[in-house]
Amino acid sequence: MRTSLILALMTALFVAGCGGEGPRAPAPSPGITEVTFWHTQSAENAEALKKIISDFSRAHPDIKITPQYTGGYTDLFRKMRAAISGGNMPDLAVAYESMVAEYASAGVVIALDEYISDPEHGLPKEKMADIFPGYIATNTFEEFGGKMLSFPFTKSNLMMYFNLDMIRKAGFEDRPKTWDEFLSQCRAIRKMTGRPAYALSVDPSTIDGMIYSFGGELYVREDGKRRTLFDSEASRNTFAVIETLAKEKLAFQINPGTYDDRDALSAERAAFMIRSSTSRPFLEDTIKDRFEWGLSEIPHAEGVKPVTVMFGANICVFRSTPERQLAAWEFIKYFVSPKVTALWATETGYLPVRKTALNEEPYKSFAEAHPRNRAAFDVIPIARPEPNLAGWQEIRKHLDRAETSVITGLKTAAETVVELTEKSNKVLAR
Amino acid sequence: MARHLSYHVPRKKTTGIKKEAERYGCWYNLDLKGGSMNRTRESLLGYGFLIPSLAVLGTFSLYPIGLAIWMSLHKCGFDGARETFLGLANYAEAFGDAEFWSALKVTVFYALGTIPATLVLSFVIANLLFMKIRGRGFYRSVYFLPFVTSAVAAAAVWKWVYHPQVEDAFGIANVVLNTIGLEGQKWLLEPRGVLTIVFGGMIPSWAAGPSLALCCVMVNSVWHALGFSVVIFLAGLSNVPTEMYDAAKIDGAGFWRTMWSVTFPMVSPTFYFLVMVSTIGAFQTFTPIYVMTAGGPAGTTTNMTMLIFDKFYTSHGTTGYAAALAIVLFGIILVLTSLQARFAGKRVHYA
Amino acid sequence: MRRPGVVILVHGVLIVGLILVAFPFFWMVSTSLKTKDESVSVPPRMLPEECRWENYAEAWNKAPFARYFVNTAAVSLAVTTAVVVTSLLAGYAFAMMEFPGKKILFVLYLSTMMIPFEVVLVPNFATINALGWQNTYAALIVPWMANVFSVFLIRQTLMSLPRDFRDAALVDGCGHLRYLWYIAAPLTRPILITAGLLAFLGSWNAFLWPLVVTNTEKMRVIQFGLQMFLREESTDYHLLMAASTFTILPIVVVYVVAQRYFIEGVSGSGLKG
């Protein structure tokens, strides 16, 4: 046993001494700009990304993009944080707006405005106009001089998914368009099946969307300070709806972090679910032709125009050398070009960022194949972004707790709204 | 009669040994009063033995702790850069923060719920696995499995067990409840305290105890910790010299007598170790809770470590505050372990 | 020797416990053999319709697992060896030797266990970068080469050895080093194996630290590969479970072999008359 111990020790030291690879892969050849890109795509989406990157390399032989899969968004955020303090930052990374805000407050993200307006490398006005305005708005950070600090990358919308067969059986013609219709359909379906009709996934973005759909805003700027509007009528109405769903057992809550609502919809144990448009391909796979189903924007209040929430990740460029920054920008430009965004949207479940993507193959045939395929795309013009203020991530956490308190009956809607406003204002005051 | 069954191996007289030491010229020093040369040599050797681990720990644990203390006295930016000196303001804020007390409460409930259960269960199981029964090796291997099952797989199974669907339930827990005539529960989604659920609304909210969700998480934790604790106890049991058991048998001691006079004392250092380590572990649990409930519902399973994680990553501008919370947690654990050391000092039997 | 009733009772209790304890593991393996639909079916299925062993091949090919295995094995072996050596030395010092400041040093050691990982993550990464070790084996190994938990464990075990072992042998003309090598280490073999096993396991399952300090595929570890199956909007459970199974198989094998060393007690060969 002693000899094997010594042997193991020597092997270990040898291995440790070997060192490994070193900070970057083999030394870059001269004339080629290397760009590292941290992303969170895995499986098939990663394949699509790799293909786009290799197409880009052919078009730009002097730029080499090295994609690195860095786990989920939280993992990426942790790694980034370590890199900001400790060194070794990437040139490009995907990020949610809230993450970009944090990066910006640390001063490591560059604004893209100069690149956009640059006569040689920029995006001319028509091209920018082709990008959905909501995507531009969400990447413009008013807190940081109204600059665009990121660009849309993997966008999606909040959609309501519904089982049309079940709705019809309950005596209605079509999906609910207003919240009142939604509640009556839920009641009827519950009466019919004896079970809750809506598989509810607690999600701050859904609450944001509901507040918008009641005609409300989430925050307001007053005297140079910002405060949330969770005590507004729209917000109270939102939580009242949730309270009703809980009281009348019209909805059941799913375990957070699971896709039980998708499973429930597939297995016909629920008629409604509200989730990101990225769920569509998975539902296609599991439901197939067993029943008729669809997706649409979420219901709205009477007298308010239909609206929904847009989310998804963006991509930002970090401060480094001018060559690398420019190379990173070229990649972004390439990625949002109509052909590429059309390809990306078809291969993954995400949405194209350009209006004209609808005219490009393969997205064109894809959209024409089935009305469901373009349902999310059609909703983009009415999709509103969530606030991209620093601190909004924490407010989302309070929103999550608020919704959980109401749906589990722990607190009333009225109490929750008051608490929520207080807590979120404290965050913004920091 | 009782005293007779004490199995200390008789000590050798020390004076005889000292004479022998002098005879061999051995450096060993029985009596610390003499030979400062010996003492210095032993001290130096002692420090030498410590240097490898100290070097690593110093760089990768002690230094960051120092840094964290420093950070906790400031308001820090996202990248940890010091912004303003706050003195103890972060700590003051913590003590006034309802979230902090809630997290502390959750942490304490969690510790109380998991540590005794794990220790008792694993001790019983380890003893069973130590007996000369057939298939011992097989059983031991199986009982280690919880520790190596991936957290994601285990969480998936537990989520199935605790599935919240009440009508047409298929979660095992709800099925069991339904069979004995009780209504299904929402388990991991239930933020109400267990006492409230069992005894109804008479219980005021502060006395409601841990939330049902937290109780479910605790069960998962005990399950997971078993594999580890059993292994440690097994190793500790292996250290009991067989002569002791033999002597006990010769003396006609039965099962419980042997347990009381031989096993318990000899295993007490291991026990002490496990109590300390379990406490430290329980106060710092993160992954088991995170994969089951991510701190929900409504913050009833958010313990101190999760709160710290939150303040580090979700909140804005609270890096210094998070560091302060970490130091507070650190202080609490330190106090607890010192108390344990003092309490156990007399009772732990070192031969 | 034992009444049959007792034996049956013991087996009974162990078997009941076994079911409870092994069930998630069983479910993990069973799911790894299901089709994608079966793996997410609700209510969940216990057994797959037919055993799809090809899931394992598919999972293996999703990421360069061979490379990950080599990395993880090398790192874990190095860490384990280092931990056993450093912990034995430190544990021995704390248990058997006297030196000024012993108590304080021990408390200092213990205190390193009391700080959550998030707090030490960023400073340690900065240290690694300052040493130029990013994306190297050194970064994966060195910070873990000492483990207070093992030190504590070994200290407890050594302190529980009958005092006469120590006294007698030390008189016999040997210094601490010889005592340690020839007597203390062999005597505490089960504990050393346990400490090694746990260190190995910790290293094998590490995710966050390797994620932060490595940048290229060539240096990644196994847990990282498992992340590949967690996609943003869905999880390929059947593949994830397959990967999880082949990931822990080496550990199970190591444990099955190691647990044989948990023999019933010291044979007393070291105790002189």
Image (cartoon, rainbow, N blue to C red):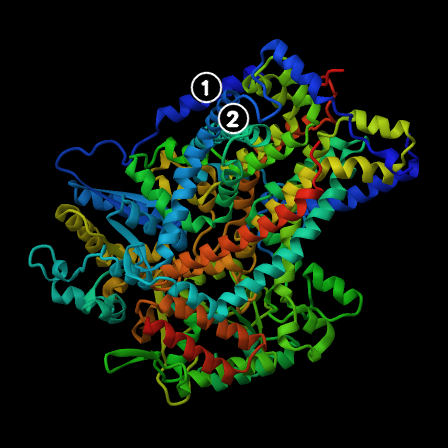
Q: SS of the residue at dot 2? A: helix
Provide the chain ID for the residue under circle 2.
C
Q: As drawn, is B154 to the left or to the right of A414?
A: right
| Disc 1: CA contacts within 10 A as few (<14), some (14-19) or many (>=20) | some
Single out the residue that lies furthest toward the top: B23
Tell me, for residue A56, which label it has, or none: none
C-alpha span from label 2 to label 1: 12 Å
On the rendered image, what quadrant is the N terminus of chain B found in? Answer: top right
Mark 2 vs 1: CB contact within 8 A: no
Whether labels 2 and 1 share one chain: no
Tell me, for residue A10, which label it has, or none: 1
Three-letter residue code for mark 1 = Met
Of residue C183 and residue A200, the one placed in the foreground of this image is C183
Q: Is residue A49 visible?
A: yes
Where is residue C244? Give x, y as percent.
Answer: 54, 41
Where is residue B292? Give x, y as percent.
Answer: 56, 57
2 or 1: mark nearer the eye:
2
**Which quadrant of the view contains residue C249?**
top right
**Residue corresponding to mark 2:** C85
Of residue A85 and residue B189, the one placed in the foreground of this image is A85
Q: As drawn, is A81 to the left or to the right of C208?
A: left
Report the residue at 38% width, 43% height from top. B63
Report the residue at 86% width, 34% height from top. B5
| Disc 2: CA contacts within 10 A as few (<14), some (14-19) or many (>=20) | many
Single out the residue that lies furthest toward the bottom: A303
Q: Is residue B285 visible?
A: no
Of residue B203 and residue C48, the one placed in the foreground of this image is B203
**Which quadrant of the view contains residue B188?**
bottom right
Q: SS of the residue at dot 1? A: helix
Where is residue B110? Give x, y as percent.
Answer: 61, 58
